[in-house]
Image (tube, grey):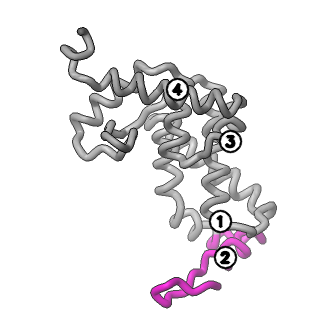
C-alpha cells in the first residue's frame, strides 16, 4: 500500500493483487474507481449508444488479463491503454462514426463543452469530418495518445497521424465558423 499526499492509504495496488488472484470484491473496487473514466472514453470513441457495451467489454477483458498486469506502472494507465485498444478495434471493425462533446477553443483545439448548444453545433461539425480525421482527433485530445500510439492503434504512419490531426483541426475550424463566413 502506498500513501497519498494527504496521508490516506492507497489500497489500489493491493486490490490489483487480490483481483489478479481471483478476488471479485477487490475487482469490484477497481471497477468502481475507474468505470467513469472508461465510460467517458467509450462515449467519445464509439458513441453514446455503444458506450455501455464497450465499457463492459473493457472490464471483462481486464478481468481476464489482470494476471498479466506487471505492475510496472499505475493500474489506471494499463486499464486505459487496454480500453483504447479495444475501442479502436471496435471502431475499425464497425466503422462507427465518432461522437464527441467538445468545443473548439482558440489556442486549444478541443476543450470540454460547457454549453449544450455549442456541443450540438460541434457534434454536427464533427459528423462532417472524414472518419480517420475524427478518430485521430479523439485519440489525441481525449484519450491522450501520442502520434506514435495513434499510428500503432490505427495502423498508419506517424506522419499520417500528424497530417490527419492538422486536417481535422482545419476542417473543424472551418465547419464551426458562422455560415456567412464559410460561404464567402
* CA distance separating discs 2 and 4: 37 Å
* CA distance separating discs 1 and 4: 30 Å
* CA distance separating discs 2 and 1: 8 Å
Question: Circle 2 is placed at which residue position?
Answer: 13
Mark 1 element type: helix
Examine the structure image and report whether residue 8 is included in the region drawn in magenta. yes
Mark 4 element type: helix
Q: Nearer the viewer, mark 2 or mark 4?
A: 4
Q: Is residue 153 left or right of residue 169?
A: right
Judge the density around disc 1: few (<14), some (14-19), many (≥20) Cα neighbours within 10 Å: some
Question: Circle 4 is placed at which residue position?
Answer: 133
Residue 179: mark in rendering: none
Q: Is residue 58 left or right of residue 96?
A: right
- Mark nearer the N terminus (1 vs 4): 1
* CA distance separating discs 2 and 3: 29 Å
Query: Between residues 95 and 179, which one lies in front from this camera angle?
Result: 179
Question: Circle 3 is placed at which residue position?
Answer: 148
- Mark nearer the N terminus (2 vs 4): 2
- Mark nearer the N terminus (4 vs 3): 4
Mark 2 element type: helix
- Mark nearer the N terminus (2 vs 3): 2
Mark 3 element type: helix
Q: Cβ–Cβ below 8 Å for labels 2 and 1? A: yes
Magenta residues (range): 1-26
Examine the structure image and report whether residue 75 is included in the region drawn in magenta. no
Question: Circle 1 is placed at which residue position?
Answer: 75
* CA distance separating discs 3 and 1: 21 Å
Q: Residue furthest top?
A: 184
Amino acid at each position: 500500500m502506498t500513501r497519498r499526499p494527504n496521508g490516506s492509504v492507497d489500497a489500489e495496488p493491493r486490490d490489483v493483487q487480490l483481483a489478479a488472484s481471483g478476488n471479485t470484491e477487490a475487482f469490484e473496487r477497481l471497477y468502481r474507481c475507474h468505470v467513469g473514466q472508461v465510460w467517458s472514453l467509450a462515449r467519445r470513441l464509439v458513441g453514446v449508444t455503444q458506450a455501455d457495451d464497450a465499457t463492459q467489454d473493457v472490464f471483462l477483458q481486464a478481468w481476464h488479463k489482470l494476471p498479466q498486469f506487471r505492475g510496472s506502472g499505475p493500474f489506471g494507465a494499463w486499464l486505459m491503454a487496454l480500453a483504447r485498444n479495444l475501442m479502436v478495434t471496435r471502431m475499425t471493425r464497425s466503422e462507427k462514426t465518432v461522437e464527441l462533446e467538445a468545443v473548439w477553443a482558440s489556442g486549444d483545439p478541443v476543450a470540454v463543452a460547457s454549453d449544450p448548444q455549442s456541443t450540438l453545433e460541434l457534434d454536427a461539425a464533427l459528423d462532417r469530418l472524414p472518419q480517420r480525421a475524427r478518430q485521430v482527433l479523439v485519440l489525441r485530445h481525449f484519450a491522450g495518445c501520442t502520434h506514435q500510439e495513434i499510428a500503432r492503434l490505427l495502423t498508419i504512419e506517424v506522419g499520417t497521424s500528424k497530417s490527419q490531426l492538422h486536417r481535422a483541426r482545419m476542417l473543424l475550424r472551418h465547419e464551426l465558423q458562422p455560415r456567412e463566413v464559410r460561404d464567402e
